[in-house]
Image: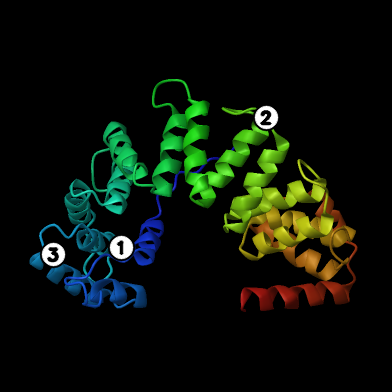
Amino acid sequence: MRFRRKIGLAVVAALLAAAPARALSPDAPDIAFGAYQRGLYLTAFQEAMKRVDADKKDAAAMTLVAELLSQGLGAPQNIEEANHWYRLAADLGDKNAQFSLAMAYLTGKGAPKDVKAATALLEQAAAQDHPGAWYNLGIIALEGNGVASDFVKAAADFRRGAALGFGEAEYSLGLLYREGRGVEKDPKQAAYWLSRAAKDEDLAAQVEYGIMLFNGDGIPADEAGGAKWLVRAANRGNPVAQNRLARLLFAGRGLKQDRVEAMKWHILASSAGLRDPWLDEESKKLTPAERLKAEQVLRAFMGA
């Protein structure tokens, strides 16, 4: 099983953009967040600071200041200063700030590593239905931190995040159902949650659900449907999907046989370190004209 801690602040940014904070007055436009959404980061930083100056309890504006400082947008990057602002906003109850500060404690980014403090902050954010907080609480339960992994708690936490539509949590819950860890082994439930994660653009889920769908693992077999998910994942740069897609195109299963396209995907997967002797042998059967065409198609795909 492959579980991944979600530490990207892009998630926080998306949540901030999706739930703009209140303006300085009920009828005033939210200039700071509007500028942030349009990529006008200097304006966003300046307007957020104006909001903080006007209201020392404007936690959402503080979180925006922290986000900009953390990424070096609109102001020089300063992780320690960003954490200071996250801490101020977290103390005021802002769930996005609580989440981001927790990630700083978990990773030691601009702050000493402190799993206990991170867990407390994640629990506060999770209580406000922050999906990433639920997911990372599940990861902490799996990691154990010196004690045995708690798969039951991990499954419960992933389920809470999954119920909020968080792709990473949906994917992880699907893996637990597939392996029977923390929940009863159930291929149908595994397929269900992996399908949801795939639809929510989780790249790893798109690969694994595509393979499950192709093979009929926990779901009626659909080779064409499985191939479509592998195409999506391959185009997003996943080497496993590229490898499987090359095999399908050489064999003509789930997709019309296309040796040129198959060669393209095989080259891409191989360049990422995923070797496949069977594909190497199939590639040798291409005609010189097909090889030339494959090179042309690859260059066009790479934008060369």
The answer to whether one can see residue 274 in this image is no
Nearer mark to the viewer, of 1 and 3: 3
> At x 89% / y 61%, what residue is drawn?
252
- Numbered tag placed on residue 71 in the rendering: 1
- The 10 Å Cα crowd at callout 2, few under 14, some 14 to 19, many 20 or more, is some
User: In 3D space, how far apart are the residues under numbered discs 2 and 3 (Cα atoms)?
Assistant: 51 Å
CB under 8 Å between discs 2 and 1: no
**Residue that numbered label 3 is attached to:** 52
- Total label count? 3
**Residue that numbered label 2 is attached to:** 185
The answer to whether one can see residue 78 in this image is yes
Disc 3 marks which amino acid?
A: Val
> At x 40% / y 54%, what residue is drawn?
8
Relative to 165, 235 lies left or right? right
- Quick one: SS at disc 1? helix
Q: In which quadrant is the C terminus drawn?
A: bottom right
